[in-house]
Image: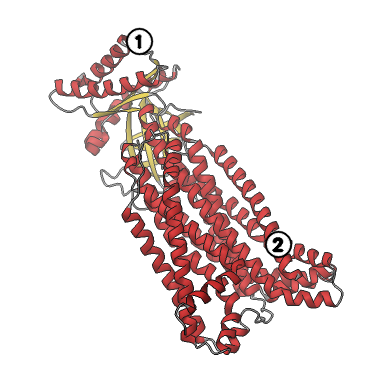
């Protein structure tokens, strides 16, 4: 054959099949572009100058693995639509004299053209928009904008290597399909009919059981620690259950509709239901994919958005005071008094107002709840095992509680007040070590110290008399060593400006070092500030939000393409059938009605099932968010509802456009 024949033929084939090739190539370009941008952002030197930059880099780097895996699965999957559509074309070439090795060379040339085009344009657009994305990320996380343009040769090489491997595997699969098929099979490949599928009751039952088990795990789990492991199990069960139910359950539904004479024996319903029933084997996987992708988009956008907008709430919970000093230094040493005094003297000298000052001591014991008794087991509590009975006990002396809360509670020697954060304590008594206390009251709220408020196990805050607090302190130091020593919390708020607060933050750190040196040792404590940690929070949750937008866009793009190819491939398959129907009297309006019926009957199932998945997963994801400090359930609910509403509107628009394309193909 003449030099350049395969190249010319490849260009011609791509142009003639542009209705299916152009969306595929555009998707390849966008996937390469997104991979490059996320990978480039993860190694951008500008992250070094950003607070929380290391956390952002780790988050983005993990995102590159997700994109790489997704790119392999998705491009491989969408290419199968192209191959199915072009089987007849390959069969025709084969009959006209082209041998299969010639077909392989033609496919290779087409693959090389797509590879060069997608990688070249993808990297070009990625480099072009990389700076824009970096500026957007800086805006989201509140970082300073750095000048300069960053291009990473290693990232370019990584993208080229990844997508060349993906396209090579796609090419090998295409060649294998052609090699094992006979010319007649290729000619009939895109229009081969299917037998009516059998009702698979056992598969439908298994799918229901798996889906129900996944839902049950998500709804019934109460322990935040256990929710981390349960999440992955529940996700796997729901994904498998979704595929089984769409494969078997959809057939059950369509056959039930066919048995309904009032519904089935109408022109638009008769054709759509019968057509989908015979195609449900291939339909089911596509619908299940759309459902899973829709669920992933909704979970990702709702959770990352709630983390971003709930950041201030998390800051206030984790850092209830603008400034706080946590100390394990015994008050008898005098270091605590000296540090706290120097802080107040500095504030007075710099005209920094001190408000809502609070100071109290506490004892913290991690124990296993067994009835109304709590066992510490010395120093050997196994937090890596079953944590359902694990509790954090915070004992506070009555005098400190009354001072901090401005109340006047009274307690006898063996009496106690209690507050619980997750699971209520309903028993009349509570025992630990050799001490037992009668619960005389339940507190409606409790001032936390931030670190304790973010415990992912249930915490009990127990107020006891000063005398009992002293006895517990002696026992704790004897049984648990340093872990049993008392802690002192000193916190306060200020209405000073941001610059003044940054000055105070540095000064408190200097005071701690200075006083520790005066006492010939390091101070056994540390300082926390809300203003200092806001920057880290913004880096972490801003990075997650940014990645969520990226991956959400990628998954939406995948959903759109699957829907588009589904409508295109079915349009070409149905064209001859509708031509026959129109020849025997079916009008254009009835064709449109049939298409609408087909869309409404099955194609809105994925978004409906995705909504059910989200509702079932809500309690589990709420616990997962609580693990990292996001406890504003109302905000998460609002973000979930808004995300679902926006996605549902987008879903309707996508299906309206693709249904119109389907109608244009069928009408010809």
Quadrant in which residue 494 is drawn = top left
Q: Nearer the viewer, mark 1 or mark 2?
A: 2
**Element at label 1:** loop
Residue at image x 80%, y 72%?
270
The quarter of the rendered structure image containing the C terminus is bottom right
**Marker count (numbered):** 2
Q: Position of residue 534 (x, y in %)?
A: 40, 31
Q: Relative to the observer, which residue lies in front, 156 or 77?
A: 156
- Relative to 469, say whether 221 is above or below: below
Task: Judge left or right: residue 309 versus residue 253.
Answer: left
- Mark 2 highlights which residue? 659
Residue at the right extreme of this rendering: 585
Q: Position of residue 637 (x, y in %)?
A: 58, 42
- Relative to 420, say whether 595 is above or below: below
The span from disc 1 to disc 2 (Cα, nearest Å) is: 68 Å
Q: Relative to the observer, which residue lies in front, 294 or 201?
A: 294
Q: Residues within 10 Å of mark 1 (few under 14, many from 20)?
A: few
**Element at label 2:** helix
Residue at image x 31%, y 23%?
505
- Mark 1 highlights which residue? 351
């Amino acid at each position: 054959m003449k030099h350049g024949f395969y190249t010319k033929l490849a260009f011609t084939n791509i142009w003639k099949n542009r209705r299916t090739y152009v969306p595929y190539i555009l998707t390849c370009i966008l996937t390469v572009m997104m991979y490059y941008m996320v990978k480039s952002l993860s190694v951008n030197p500008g992250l070094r100058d950003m607070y929380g930059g290391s956390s952002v880099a780790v988050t983005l780097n993990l995102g590159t693995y997700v994109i790489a895996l997704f790119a392999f699965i998705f491009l491989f999957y969408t290419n199968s639509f192209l191959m199915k559509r072009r089987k007849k074309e390959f069969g025709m070439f084969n009959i006209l004299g082209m041998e299969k090795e010639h077909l392989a060379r033609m496919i290779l040339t087409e693959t090389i053209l797509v590879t060069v085009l997608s990688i070249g344009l993808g990297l070009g657009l990625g480099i072009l928009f990389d700076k824009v994305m970096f500026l957007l990320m800086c805006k989201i996380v509140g970082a300073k904008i750095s000048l300069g343009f960053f291009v990473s040769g290693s990232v370019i090489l990584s993208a080229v290597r990844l997508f060349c491997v993906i396209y090579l595997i796609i090419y090998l699969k295409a060649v294998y399909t052609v090699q094992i098929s006979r010319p007649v099979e290729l000619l009939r490949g895109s229009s081969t009919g299917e037998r009516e599928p059998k009702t698979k009751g056992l598969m439908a039952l298994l799918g229901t059981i798996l889906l129900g088990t996944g839902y049950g795990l998500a709804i019934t789990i109460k322990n935040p620690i256990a929710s981390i492991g349960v999440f992955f199990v529940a996700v796997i069960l729901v994904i498998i259950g979704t595929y089984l139910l769409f494969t078997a359950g959809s057939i059950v539904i369509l056959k039930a509709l066919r048995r309904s004479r009032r519904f089935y024996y109408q022109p638009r319903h008769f054709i759509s239901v019968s057509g989908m029933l015979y195609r449900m084997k291939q339909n089911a996987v596509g619908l299940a994919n759309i459902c899973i992708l829709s669920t992933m988009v909704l979970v990702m956008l709702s959770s990352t958005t709630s983390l971003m907008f709930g950041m201030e709430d998390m800051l206030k919970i984790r850092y209830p005071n603008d400034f706080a000093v946590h100390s394990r230094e015994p008050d008898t040493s005098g270091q605590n008094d000296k540090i706290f005094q120097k802080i107040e003297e500095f504030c007075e000298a710099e005209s920094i107002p001190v408000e809502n000052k609070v100071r109290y001591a506490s004892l913290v014991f991690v124990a296993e709840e067994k009835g109304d008794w709590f066992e510490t087991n010395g120093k050997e509590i196994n937090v890596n095992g079953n944590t359902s009975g694990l509790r954090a006990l915070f004992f506070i002396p009555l005098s400190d509680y009354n001072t901090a809360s401005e109340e006047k509670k009274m307690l006898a020697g063996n009496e106690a007040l209690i507050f619980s954060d997750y699971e209520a304590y309903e028993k009349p008594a509570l025992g630990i070590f050799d001490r037992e206390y009668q619960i005389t009251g339940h507190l409606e709220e409790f001032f936390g110290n931030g670190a304790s408020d973010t415990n992912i196990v249930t915490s009990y805050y127990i107020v006891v008399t000063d005398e009992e607090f002293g006895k517990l302190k002696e026992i704790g130091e004897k049984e648990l060593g340093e872990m049993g020593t008392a802690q002192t919390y000193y916190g306060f708020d200020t209405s000073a400006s941001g610059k003044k607060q940054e000055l105070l933050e540095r000064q408190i750190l200097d005071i701690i070092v200075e006083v520790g040196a005066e006492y010939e040792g390091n101070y056994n404590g540390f300082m926390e500030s809300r203003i200092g940690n806001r920057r880290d929070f913004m880096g972490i949750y801003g990075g997650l939000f940014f990645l969520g937008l990226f991956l959400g866009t990628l998954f939406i793009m995948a959903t759109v393409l699957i829907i588009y190819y589904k409508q295109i491939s079915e349009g070409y398959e149905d064209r001859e059938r509708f031509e026959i129907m129109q020849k025997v009297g079916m009008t254009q309006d009835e064709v449109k009605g049939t298409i609408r019926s087909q869309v409404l009957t099955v194609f809105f199932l994925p978004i409906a099932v995705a909504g059910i998945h989200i509702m079932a997963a809500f309690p589990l994801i709420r616990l997962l968010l609580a693990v990292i400090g996001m406890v504003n359930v109302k905000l998460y609910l609002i973000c979930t509802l808004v995300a679902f509403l926006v996605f549902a509107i987008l879903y309707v628009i996508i299906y309206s456009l693709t249904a119109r394309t389907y109608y244009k193909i069928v009408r010809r």
